[in-house]
């Protein structure tokens, strides 16, 4: 998971995540630089998906 670098893409990703998962709150999407694993962990708990699924979705969203 460490190869997923969200810096610079985070605001775009937050918008896409809110669009896809309308029940996510700003608190759910709180992100601190260098804390990608924590961010993915929070999404994992909220969305009930594996870390790999979340990371895969984030990678796909970054490519769009």
Image (tube, rainbow, N blue to C red):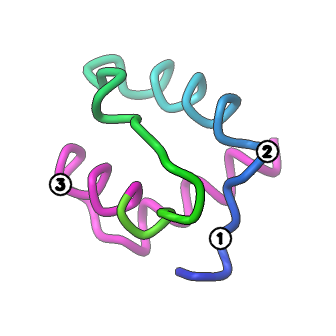
User: How many residues crowd mark 3 within 10 Å: few (<14), some (14–19), many (20+)?
Assistant: few
Q: Is residue 7 left or right of residue 17?
A: right
How would you classify the magenta stretch by its main secondary structure? helix
Relative height, residue 37 to residue 14 (above, below): below
Disc number placed over residue 45 in the picture, else none = 3
Whichever of callouts 3 and 1 sits on the residue coming sooner in the sequence is 1
Identify the residue at the far front of this view: 33
Which residue occupies 27% across, 52% down? 42
Q: Is residue 57 left or right of residue 11?
A: left
Q: What number of labels is visible?
A: 3
What is the distance, in whole Å, between disc 3 and disc 1 at their CAs?
Answer: 18 Å
Residue corresponding to mark 1: 4
What is the distance, in whole Å, between disc 3 and disc 2 at their CAs?
Answer: 24 Å
Relative height, residue 6 to residue 15 (above, below): below
14 drawn magenta: no
Q: Position of residue 4 (x, y in %)?
A: 65, 70
Q: Which region is colored magenta?
A: 39-64
Disc number placed over residue 30 in the picture, else none = none
Which residue occupies 66% across, 30% down? 11
Tag 3–tag 1 contact (CB < 8 Å): no
Q: Position of residue 52 (x, y in %)?
A: 43, 74
In the rendered image, which quarter contains the C terminus? top right
User: How many residues crowd mark 1 within 10 Å: few (<14), some (14–19), many (20+)?
Assistant: few
Q: Is residue 8 left or right of residue 48?
A: right
Q: Nearer the viewer, residue 44 or 36?
A: 36
Q: Secondary structure at mark 2?
A: loop
Identify the residue at the far bottom of this view: 2
Which residue occupies 40% across, 55% down? 39
Disc number placed over residue 8 in the picture, else none = 2
Q: Secondary structure at mark 3?
A: helix
């Amino acid at each position: 998971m460490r190869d997923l670098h969200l810096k610079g893409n985070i605001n775009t990703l937050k918008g896409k995540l809110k669009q896809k998962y309308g029940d996510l709150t700003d608190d759910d999407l709180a992100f601190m630089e260098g804390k990608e694993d924590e961010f993915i962990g929070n999404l994992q708990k909220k969305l009930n998906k594996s870390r790999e699924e979340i990371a895969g979705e984030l990678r796909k969203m970054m490519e769009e």
